[in-house]
Amino acid sequence: MQRPPPSVRVVTIPFADLEDRGKDLSGKIGDGFGRQGLGIVAIADVPGYPELRKRLLRLAPRVANLPEEVKKGLEDPNSRYNFGWSHGKQKFESGKFDTFKGSYFANPLFDVPTTDNVLLTRFPSYCRPNIWPNDDLPELQTAFKDIGKLMLEVGLMLAHHCDHYASVCISVMKQGMGPYVGESLEQTLARSRCHKGRLLYYFPQKFSKQKDGQSISSWCGWHTDYASLTGLTCGLFMRKSVEIPCSDSGAGLHIRSHDNRVVKVTFKDDELAYMTGETAEILSRGHLRATPHCVKAPSCEDASLVDRSTFALFVQPNWDEKIKFPSEFPYHQELSIPPNETLAYGEYSERILNKHYVART
Ligand SMILES: O=C(O)CCC(=O)C(=O)O
Ligand SMILES: [Fe+2]
């Protein structure tokens, strides 16, 4: 039998340090997010966070278990299921549909990001209005918005220190992919109206001796987020609605390192993690590295009936923000973006969605 990937504890920054704009965190940012890093850092002791995490994650199975006809009414095909309920609509890895999890998407800051019809048609995955199950699960809206706002606030603090790290890289001429001519990550993200929250519910998997049940990406396929920073809560595991520690220490979030090794990453329940996405790599001119990741389901026998709930906040530029693609950009060759092309962020992500989602009919 193949050995499971090693477990690695992620670089951790105390909130009190993060909050201090003058503090030099470039060592830790470099260890976590730099070219050799795993592309993930955790923030410890964020005030109020543990309560907000539990309050929202406990609602994930309740959303997933709403009656089918209620969930149907919470879908938004016009946004390619990027608002409201989404299950089995997204394709990862070799075109497989992700049926093992259900998601609830919403913008935690703006219920109606714009009323401009041209924008609504051009960038539906960012501009359409939120959908809330106000009759069936009224608690969801506040729980979702409260944690989403906190995770954005902390994410912007982190972006400030990322900008500082990128400027330190230039001054000491570390190995980036060129001079730092990019915009400030913090300012770009602070003016965005389209940060997106995603409440995820991973359905229990039946125990199977089949190879597939044990693959590293058995709960969520390999991918790299295209946002800038993805805020991520530590997964909450439950069996038949009772919270449990996960009985399979090999289950959970896995990352592919810069030298192509797969590791399982761990952070504490009360820590708030952030991963780097493609637009952090682009905006930092390669000084930060985007993180390929996937999620493994528990595969030992007593782990059947175990589910996992988590929340991701995609902190990203506004739809109209112009992104200049560097000539060395290694991602999405299939989108045929010419080197040094400038594309609106919304245009870039709609093209990616075309690839990942069922085409709208
Ligand atoms: O479930 C997780 O921990 C990761 C989720 C994820 O990668 C995503 O939603 O993009
Ligand atoms: Fe992801």
Image: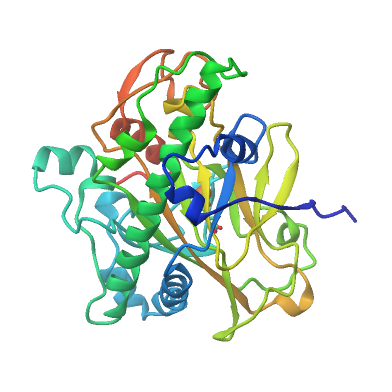
Q: Residue at x 31, y 34 (%)?
A: 188
Q: Is residue 267 left or right of residue 91?
A: right
Q: Nearer the viewer, residue 23 or 51?
A: 23
Asked which quadrant contains residue 192, the reply is: top left
Can see residue 228? no
Question: What is the total number of numbered labels drawn onto the structure image?
Answer: 0
Q: Quadrant of the N terminus?
A: bottom right
Query: Looking at the picture, does residue 184 appear above or below residue 268?
Result: above
Q: Is residue 257 left or right of residue 153?
A: right
Q: Residue at x 44, y 73 (%)?
A: 60
Scheme of colours in the image: rainbow
For the view shown, which residue lies furthest in the front direction? 22
Asked which quadrant contains residue 169, the reply is: top right
Residue 284: give x, y in percent of width and height.
46, 26
Q: Residue at x 42, y 80 (%)?
A: 62
For the view shown, which residue lies furthest in the right direction? 1
Q: Is residue 118 left or right of residue 60?
A: left
Q: Nearer the viewer, residue 213 or 7?
A: 7
Residue 58: give x, y in percent of width and height.
46, 78
Residue 264: give x, y in percent of width and height.
71, 53
Can see residue 43? yes
Query: Looking at the picture, does residue 213 appear above or below residue 203?
Result: above
Q: Nearer the viewer, residue 130 or 212?
A: 130
